[in-house]
Amino acid sequence: MLINQLTHYAMNNHTPVWKFVSLLVLCCVLRSYCNAQASGQNAPQLGKASVKQVIAAMTLEEKAMLVVGAGRGFGPRPPAQSPAKRDSAQKTATQGPMIGQTEQKVPGAAGVTHAIPRLGIPAMVLSDGPAGVRISPIRKGDSSRTYYATAFPVGTLLASSWDTDLVRQVGVAFGHEVHEYGIDILLGPGMNIHRNPLGGRNFEYYSEDPLVTGKMAAAMVEGIQSNGVGTSIKHYVANNQETHRNTINTIVSERAMREIYLRGFEIAVKDAHPWTVMTSYNKLDGTYTSERHDLVTTILRKEWGFKGFVMTDWGGGHNPIAQMKAGNDLLMPGNPNQVKAIIDAVDNKQLDESILNANVEHILNIILRSPAFKDYKYSDAPDLKKDAQVSRMAAAQGMVLLKNSGAPLPFHGVTKVALFGNTSYDMIAGGTGSGNVNKAYVISLAQGLQNAGLQVEASLLKAYPAYLADAKAKQPKPVRGMFRPAPPIPQMTIADADLQQDAADADIAVITIGRNAGEGADRTLPDDYYLSDAEKALIKNVSGAFHAKGKKVVVVLNIGGVIEVAGWRDEVDGILLAWQPGLEAGNAITDVLSGKVDPSGKLATTFAMDYKDVPSAKNFPGKEFPDQAVKVGNRTIMPAEVTYEDGIYVGYRYYSTYKVTPAYAFGYGLSYTSFGYSHLKLSSPTFKGKLYATVIITNTGKAAGKEVAELYLSAPAGKLDKPVLELKGFAKTRLLQPGESQTLRFELNARALASYDTAKEAWLAEAGNYTVRIGASSTDIRQTAKFKLIKGTVAEQDEKALAPEVAINELRGK
Ligand code: BGC
């Protein structure tokens, strides 16, 4: 009967053969599923019976469906079951969850899990992404209102605040939107390492350093989850590029994995207990991360004590059975073939049902905590006005003042600004892809300045928007919707006479340089990492005209990842790195330019002098194997491989050890005031399990401000190779008035002293003298003190895992 109906449906809808086969597969699964539903009158109910009892009552089909998302190919949508106001939206929404039980609650969400009503198991809704809730802003058939969300500042900006309390606060507001839009799990934060500036998704991630990454992610997870919803820290792990992201085989040493790429995840898991972890698309040493038992079970669950569930990235990995065995509990977005493969594998004894039971248990334990299970009556009406203010405040706190020669900032005596650069009038709130947020508006810098009562040079205020509107109308439509940013619009050219006029009229020039990138592609060197010729000409011409009149020029960088700055920075007086600051962009930038907010951000990622200085430049994004390429439909699947020869020498660990001068060092950032560091004290001259360092920070300047102090540790030379220094702690002062001081305190434990000894699979703190260096950046150390570790210590013994099968020609310290 069901098969007949599906055949009929498929024919009427001109369903392609593959879809039809999927429907048939689904049909067989459904038959036994429906039998179970029918016999479910007295079945144990989730929440009333124990999880173990519920699992014992589940059929094999139900278990297989619970571990596979209800995303693609699960057949026609059921009649809507939701409140009347959502009826019409459900009928027309585009994603198709399941078979009679799961309504589409949240159009535009990334995925849903299967419901099993006879056991009281509801479906959960999973939604992107790291900088704000990504759902459809408009629902067909519902023209009465919109469903916008707040675009918060991107990860790179939040990390530059070095302020975990601030990030937690953003998380609290963000998680409230997740909850009020009917979502159970937010697919973020993204926390891969900035291994290379060209990484297309770097904007979603935090830093080149694992401590900053881990602490920021933990704060975000805590904030979001404080609302009673879940997070999914992603992408686990070594997913540091977008080129060939679904096929790339990443080869990394165990030490680099443990110290750099896994470390942030470890901190986030241990400190903040995310509900879920998302495995990445890439392979690690030949095996997809989602199929690696050592990553997903040995390290994540056993070593770190992770208690939630693990899901794949969307369509990630290859073999559902290997994924189940690895402990990757949920396959997203899910398709009927995966359900069938799992059922068959249990029937054929290729998959022990106890493994499936464990995966189901992990998922059920989280469902029990979900808003869906609690039947939370979400409002669909978060307070977007309030959250916009959180976004604006956070944005201003994470901006980094890179240059302020002759103090053009904060504005003084400025009433009229000559505002140049396309992006000044069309700001980039955040990157593209699943990290994009559908927001109601983005405040441009032109608007922001005017909102603060400043004038923007009228001729420019007229010319730029007209030019942009015209250029946008001519732009080709994006090929794959969200996955590619629109090609940048060439800079508007300004006639020399007009420029002279602007320089005569305005008090200062501000030029915005913008960059966008996102999922599916890495950035390019020409016209992206490096400025385009038109951008260079704009900076040169504007600076020439304004300097000739004794007026200053400031560049605002509205970018998601690092660009080249050394070649042009001498031409301008000030540079404010505004990153991609979310929907209040122009207001937040104006807050800093005007001096309403003192810039207190510092770089969580290095700006190199040139790309060739980047330690991973020689092997990014790796090599392709065209002779092994396979055609699938009209796509070519290209096998590719990248070897992390930079080892542990990522970012400042490399620049400091190899004495390569960066343009702007890790940890660097200026303020409108200045700070003194004094009285560094250690709790003991010898290390006995724990050690505390305190330092006094004093505002020695004339404006109120906050200072980020960074604690670096230099370990003694010993058996293990070590970077010259490594970040082991950081803290930010409160707003200090001129003359005011604050004592900051840092804690060091044995792990902070240790490096990873691959031969022993252990974290080893070697005996000798350690130097604590507290500074304003990785190259601006203000106070040092020494302590001694008398006897070498194993800070942690791990299990055998990870070792790559091929030898790597890794960098070693000098
Ligand atoms: C991305 C994930 C995202 C998922 C769901 C994938 O393509 O890599 O970060 O959460 O899609 O949209």
Image: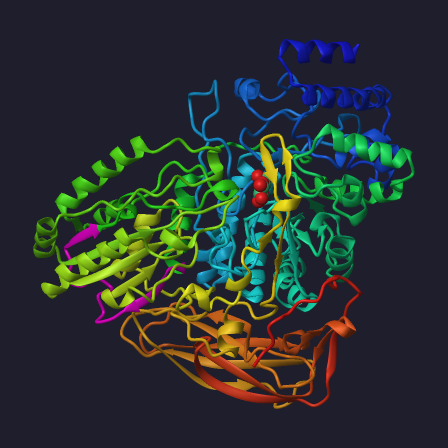
> In this view of the protein, can residue 562 be seen by the observer?
yes
Image location (x, y in percent) of residue 452? 23, 50
Above-or-below relation of 782 to 85 = below
Q: From this viewpoint, which residue is outermost toward the front?
A: 627
Quadrant of the image containing the C terminus: bottom right
Above-or-below relation of 176 to 752 = above
- In the displayed structure image, the side of residue 406 where residue 321 appears, left or right: right
- In the displayed structure image, the side of residue 506 where residue 672 appears, left or right: right
> Quadrant location of residue 315?
top right
Magenta part of the protein: which range? 398-419
- Residue at the location (64% across, 16% down)? 15
Image location (x, y in percent) of residue 242? 54, 49
> In this view of the protein, can residue 65 be seen by the observer?
no
State how many labels appear.
0
- In the displayed structure image, the side of residue 811 where residue 25 appears, left or right: right
Decide which of 186, 313 is in the foreground and name it. Answer: 313
Image location (x, y in percent) of residue 670? 34, 70
Above-or-below relation of 450 to 765 = above
- Residue at the location (80% across, 65% down)? 800
Displayed-image quarter of ligand 1: top right
Quadrant of the image containing the N terminus: top right
Image location (x, y in percent) of residue 370? 66, 40
